[in-house]
Amino acid sequence: MYRNATICYRGNKLAASTFDQQKNIKKMNRQTATELIIQSIKTKKVKFQDLANAIGSSLIWTIHALHGQAALDKTAAEKIGEILSLTPELVESLQEIPLRSALQPTPTDPTLYRLTEMMQNYGPDIKAAINELFGDGAMSGIDFTVGIERVESPNGARVKLTLDGKFLPFNKF
């Protein structure tokens, strides 16, 4: 049972926490922390690519972590905290192992909807091609990278996504 949510500036650092009366400790709410971290990125006009470069990670993975879907190691979290002037609670929240991609309704954001639509439309075909090329199995979403490129075209700029995942054969038992 969390009460007494606090969102404020502590000195020049953005802070948010809740108080767990049962344990008598302050605890950062990850969703609130994510919102505050993204707000700090916007306020400071920092590019995700600059943050990715600062911690030596890819653009997509860095955004994924800053959106609360992956945990940063202590060094990377502290570096992000330094760049964004985050409180120790926010830096600590970046290191928490998240609850990833819980079942959610169809997204309404146009980009997320289109990505979902692509997998709904082409997912079975991609699966069939993977099975034909590799056998019975799946592509890992854990041993996995994502690349994104802008490709110029006579008909306008295009988005090129590269999904690179390890093949995981199904075991027979």
Image (spheres, rainbow, N blue to C red):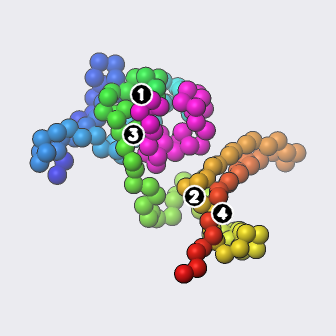
Q: CA distance from mark 2 to mark 1?
A: 27 Å
The residue lying at 66 percent from left, 75 percent from top is 136
Mark seen at residue 167: 4
Query: Most prominent secondary structure in the magenta stretch?
Result: helix
Identify residue type, mark 1. Answer: Glu
- The residue that disc 3 covers is 95
What distance separates the C-alpha of mark 3 from that of mark 4?
Answer: 28 Å
The residue stretch that appears in magenta? 49-77
- Secondary structure at numbered mark 2: strand
- In the rendered structure, the answer to whether residue 129 lies left or right of residue 1 reads right
- Name the side, left or right, on which 133 lies relative to 1: right
Structural crowding at the residue carrying mark 3, measured as other residues with C-alpha within 10 Å and reported as few (<14), some (14–19) or many (≥20): some
Alpha carbon distance from label 4 to label 1: 34 Å
Residue 135, image x, y percentages: 71, 73
* Left or right: residue 158 compared with residue 22: right
Cα separation, mark 1 vs mark 3, equals 9 Å
Q: Counting residues from the N terminus, which is met first, the one under dot 4 or under dot 2?
A: 2
